[in-house]
Image (spheres, coloured by chain):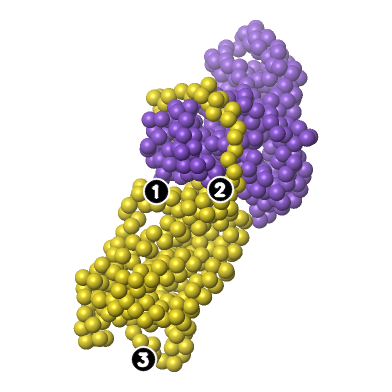
């Protein structure tokens, strides 16, 4: 890896981008170590894509500075372009062309000769399990195939830095796992990856450091462990048999878990965070078990119980005190699989 | 894209991590392609698009045939005594008019492409920046050539006999295609500037109709009022039509050819940089 002497693939200071009166990116500072996967987590409209576009030289920052491998993204855009690749819903491939044609076209544009381009395209299609679809126009591809060809197009030349802007939004779990496998294979070869996502578990699976971004600002940054301990390791979802018992259940849980308990719109449902303060979720299950026992002792019947990772909404609630819905301005982009819920807690 | 389905990937073969790793290990990075090579590659893309959507050749085949037939028989009797005589005068002019009109589709295709996902990928590549735009125009130059050949064929069938012979005709077409290539930079600009396909069409019509009709394509400008003559005689389309008419008649009209090329150069010099500025700012 030909990293910058500082060992940083990306370094930004006070990065700003405004659209009209909206500050889409409002003073973002990032330091991404080379050779790692760095997760940028945030809801729609948080400024993730705008940040990526500035780093990939597609948008000119209105303020602040950004360097990629030590090159300024505005003044040395060409050097940056030769080191990075980009995959996002806005940076994909030509739908009218076939898979092979797309890859050959891009390989040629990257300077490969005719035969080398053909070979590289064929090898990539093979590695990505797309050989059968190679001669089909990309517009007839499924979502999972589209994402594969998009990523294949981004690694025609092994990039030093790969931007993956919401690579799994809208994919089914299986295709999602395939994309994750690809990301792991790419990183194993030394490429730095900047991954934006709306899903905490995706960042958790792939990234070593995570920045949480909201309203154009980084509101939390750290290793996965650091982030989790600030949010809580997970959340307990409960459904009671009798809605009458909900206020009582809430009180019992509050005491047992020493955490905020939220009332869901569903009159029999409650949610509570567990494992707050522990770095790796240790004790979350024990805490939850204890809480269940307490509920049973108080004569409250629980119909349904689950312990899960905090959703993005819960991370947001914990970090910002407001939920993601308020920021959900562009409904056009693929919406998160997590339901946003009203903040019903008093 | 965001409408991905949930049942789709059933038969999708798994990703081969080993072969992928082997591909990624090869970190050789070829030297960046030359400006010409990148432009030609984008031209190849334009041709591939024609291959996949051959219907888009409709405007360079059916439309020109219609133009020749319509104007020859509509005006022929009235303006020159007979369609057969009129076509000697009309064909080079209607050729110029039709091809220049066809150029406006460039703006539409640029505009629809920006909306699609591939545009930002091109912009993120380390290549000669204008090559994307030059590629469109190279593909379009092929379309202009097809349109010219189609119209000439129809003209020859209707009785058009160019005195300039093959060389004169080829020179005329070459000049027309070169001019149209340069003229199209106006449309790449509008394609990037305007927000919707419809507005690109609307603005293009506003430019193209007066520009092509207010020329010497159909009639000799001497019959027009003085103020209109002033415009018509200095219009680039008039110069181009005279030059093509002269070349096909074997006259080698140096001045008109020079005027046409001069206008072509001016279009590139003015609208080329504006296009690239918009492209970089998009």
The nearer-to-camera label among 3 and 1 is 1
- The picture places residue A291, in percent across and down from the top left corner, at 67, 12
Which residue position is annotated with label 3? B223
- What residue appears at the point 43 percent right and 24 percent down from the top-left corner? B13
Q: Is residue B20 above or below residue B185?
A: above
Q: CA distance from mark 3 to mark 2?
A: 54 Å
Q: Which chain is purple?
A: A
Mark drawn on residue B48: 1
Q: Is residue A333 visible?
A: no
- Mark 2 or 1: the one toward you: 2
Dot 1 lies on which element? helix
In depth, the one of A116 and B70 nearer the eye is A116
Instruction: Note whether B64 is above or below A112 in the view shown.
Output: below
Where does the image place residue A35, in percent across and percent down from the top left? 68, 29
The residue identified by callout 2 is B33
**Can see residue A278?**
yes
Task: Read off the chain for label 3.
Answer: B
Q: Nearer the viewer, mark 3 or mark 2?
A: 2
Circle 2 sits in a helix, a strand or a loop, which is it?
loop
Above or below for B128 versus B269: above
Question: Are discs 3 and 1 less than 8 Å apart at CB?
Answer: no
């Amino acid at each position: 890896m030909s990293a910058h002497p500082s060992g940083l693939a990306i370094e930004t200071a006070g990065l700003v981008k405004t659209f009209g009166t909206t500050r889409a990116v409002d003073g973002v500072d990032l330091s991404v170590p080379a050779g790692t996967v760095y997760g940028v987590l945030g809801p729609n409209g948080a400024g993730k894509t705008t940040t990526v576009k500035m780093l990939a030289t597609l948008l000119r920052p209105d303020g602040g500075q950004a360097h990629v491998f030590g090159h300024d993204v505005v003044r040395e855009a060409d050097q940056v372009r030769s080191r990075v690749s980009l995959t996002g819903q806005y940076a994909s491939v030509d739908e009218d062309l076939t898979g092979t044609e797309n890859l050959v076209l891009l390989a040629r544009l990257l300077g490969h000769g005719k035969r080398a381009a053909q070979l590289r395209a064929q090898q990539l299609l093979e590695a990505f399990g797309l050989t059968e679809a190679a001669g089909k126009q990309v517009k007839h591809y499924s979502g999972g195939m589209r994402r594969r060809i998009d990523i294949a197009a981004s690694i025609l030349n092994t990039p030093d830095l790969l931007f993956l802007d919401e690579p799994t939004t809208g994919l089914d779990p299986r295709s999602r796992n395939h994309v994750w496998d690809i990301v792991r294979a790419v990183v194993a070869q030394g490429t730095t990856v900047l991954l934006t996502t709306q899903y905490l578990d995706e960042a958790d699976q792939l990234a070593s450091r995570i920045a949480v971004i909201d309203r154009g600002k980084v509101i939390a940054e750290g290793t996965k462990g650091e982030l989790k301990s600030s949010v809580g390791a997970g959340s307990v979802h409960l459904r009671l048999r009798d809605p009458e018992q909900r206020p009582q259940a809430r009180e019992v849980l509050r005491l047992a878990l020493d955490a905020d308990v939220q009332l869901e719109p569903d009159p029999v449902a409650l949610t509570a965070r567990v494992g707050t303060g522990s770095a790796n979720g240790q004790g979350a299950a024990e805490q939850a078990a204890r809480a269940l026992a307490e509920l049973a002792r108080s004569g409250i019947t629980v119909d349904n119980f689950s312990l899960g990772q905090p959703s993005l909404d819960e991370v947001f609630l914990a970090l910002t005190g407001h939920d993601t819905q308020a920021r959900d301005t562009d409904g056009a982009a693929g919406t998160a699989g997590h339901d946003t819920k009203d903040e019903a807690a008093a | 894209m965001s409408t991905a389905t949930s049942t789709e990937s059933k038969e999708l073969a798994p990703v081969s991590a080993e072969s992928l790793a082997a591909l990624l290990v090869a970190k050789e990075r070829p030297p960046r392609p030359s400006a010409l090579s990148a432009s030609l590659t984008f031209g190849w893309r334009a041709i591939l698009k024609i291959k996949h959507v051959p219907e888009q050749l409709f405007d360079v085949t059916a439309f020109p045939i219609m133009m020749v037939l319509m104007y020859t028989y509509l005006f022929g009797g009235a303006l020159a005594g007979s369609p057969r005589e009129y076509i000697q005068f009309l064909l080079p002019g209607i050729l110029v008019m039709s091809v220049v009109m066809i150029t406006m589709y460039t703006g539409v295709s640029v505009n629809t492409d920006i909306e699609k996902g591939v545009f930002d990928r091109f912009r993120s590549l380390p290549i000669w920046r204008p090559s994307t735009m030059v590629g469109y125009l190279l593909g379009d130059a092929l379309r202009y050539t097809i349109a010219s050949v189609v119209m000439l064929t129809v003209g020859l069938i209707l009785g058009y006999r160019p005195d300039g012979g093959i060389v004169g005709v080829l020179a005329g077409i070459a000049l027309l295609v070169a001019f149209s290539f340069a003229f199209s930079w106006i449309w790449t600009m509008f394609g990037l500037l305007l927000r919707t396909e419809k507005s690109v069409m609307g603005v293009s019509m506003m430019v193209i109709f007066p520009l092509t009709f207010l020329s010497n394509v159909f009639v000799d400008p001497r019959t027009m009022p003085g103020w209109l003559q002033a415009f018509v005689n200095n219009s680039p389309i008039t110069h181009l039509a005279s030059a093509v008419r002269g070349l096909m008649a074997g006259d080698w009209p140096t001045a008109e050819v020079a005027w046409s090329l001069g206008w072509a150069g001016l279009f590139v010099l003015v609208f080329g940089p504006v296009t690239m500025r918009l492209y970089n700012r998009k």
